[in-house]
Amino acid sequence: LPTIATVIGSGTMGPGIAATLARAGATVRLYDISPDAIARAEAAYDVVRGVLESVDSPSAPGGSVSFGTDLDAALADTELIIEAVPEKLELKQKVFADLEARIGDDVIIATNTSGIPITTMAESMTVPARLIGMHWSNPPHLIPMIEVIPGEKTSSELVDQLIEIVKAFNYVPVLEKEIPGFVENRVLYAILRECMALLEEGIVTPEGLDACVKWGIGYKLSVVGPTRLLDMAGLDIYQAVSGYLNKDLDASTDTPQFIKDKIAAGQLGFKTNGGMYEYGDGDVDAKRKEIITGLIAARKTLASIP
Ligand code: NAD
């Protein structure tokens, strides 16, 4: 694990990333251009630390997080920079230019992009070999898996190095070839596309859909994974079903109209107290807590089985 690491961007993802590395022993500087974002992260830090403790996230003494809006201070002697600013190509390229003007050629820049090609982002860089995709799953301090995505110019030594870094804080690195959306989001969006089509056609209620997917798919896949599931089911069974079912599955290429309508009506989900479900006073906070409690319990259980 690098001794000193810097996380750029303290929004949804940055604080959990910083806390995970710090608990594993790194000195982490969390930087944001927004003083408000830094203040929010600092105020919420104890909660994040508590979550890491309750899942027995790997720990080593000496780690810490410092919070700040001074970029030079955040970068002093850093070995690894993790970029977690909003998902906009031009913004990320500008951030990389600001970073490269201040750091030595051997400093790693890992981007938490959800799907912008690494090769495209690296085009404007002075040292494109130092850029690599490091895609954490949200919440980053709870999901112990990271997709590692080299671009065309990423050095092969850096790929090996990042895999070792991820293993050093006991997360599972998954090495992938570059593809839009990367593997996790491609699979998730394939599931979501079919789910939204089933709702739109009125085949099932939202409550029914959630119950079916949580137990019938999520529960099982959290233990065996899709490849092993096929062995369990039998490849012949898969052939028999996929032979008639695949052609019937939703193949639309745009966002469903009913989702667009909800957005136009200001229904975005938790952040507007309504989206797919409606939330009364206090319901969103209660749901958020319930989800974190569930994730903690499930991770502990999953960590205890081979
Ligand atoms: P966010 O909008 O919650 O936070 C981004 C932060 O970056 C904000 O606090 C903002 O003030 C700050 N910022 C903006 N410009 C900056 C600059 N020039 N320098 C420093 N900080 C700056 O975003 P997020 O959800 O944390 O996502 C960050 C990245 O992680 C994105 O690329 C996103 O696609 C990816 N990601 C997000 C999730 C998720 O579920 N939210 C999951 C995996 C990956």
Image (cartoon, rainbow, N blue to C red):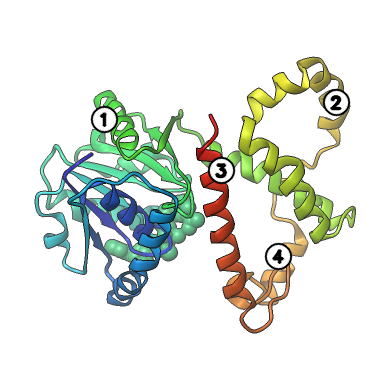
Q: Residue furthest bottom?
A: 281
Q: Ligand 1 quadrant?
A: bottom left
In this rendering, would 238 be left or right of 41? right
In whole angstroms, how far apart are the C-alphas of marks 2 and 1? 42 Å
Marks 2 and 4, the one that precedes in the sequence? 2
The local secondary structure at tag 4 comes to helix
Residue 197 x/y as whole percent: 80, 51
**Residue 222, quarter of the rendered image:** top right
The local secondary structure at tag 1 comes to helix
Residue 185 x/y as whole percent: 56, 43
Marks 2 and 3, the one that precedes in the sequence? 2
Marks 2 and 1, the one that precedes in the sequence? 1
Dot 2 crowding, Cα within 10 Å, few <14, some 14–19, many 20+: few
Residue hosting label 3: 301
Dot 1 crowding, Cα within 10 Å, few <14, some 14–19, many 20+: some
Q: Nearer the viewer, mark 2 or mark 3?
A: 3
State the mark number for residue 241. 2
Amino acid, disc 3: Thr
Q: Are marks 2 and 1 in contact (CB under 8 Å)?
A: no
Q: Residue 110 or 221: which is nearer the viewer? A: 221
Q: Are marks 2 and 3 in contact (CB under 8 Å)?
A: no
> Is the CB–ligand 1 distance for label 3 below 8 Å?
no
Residue hosting label 4: 260
In this rendering, would 65 be left or right of 9? left
Residue hosting label 1: 161
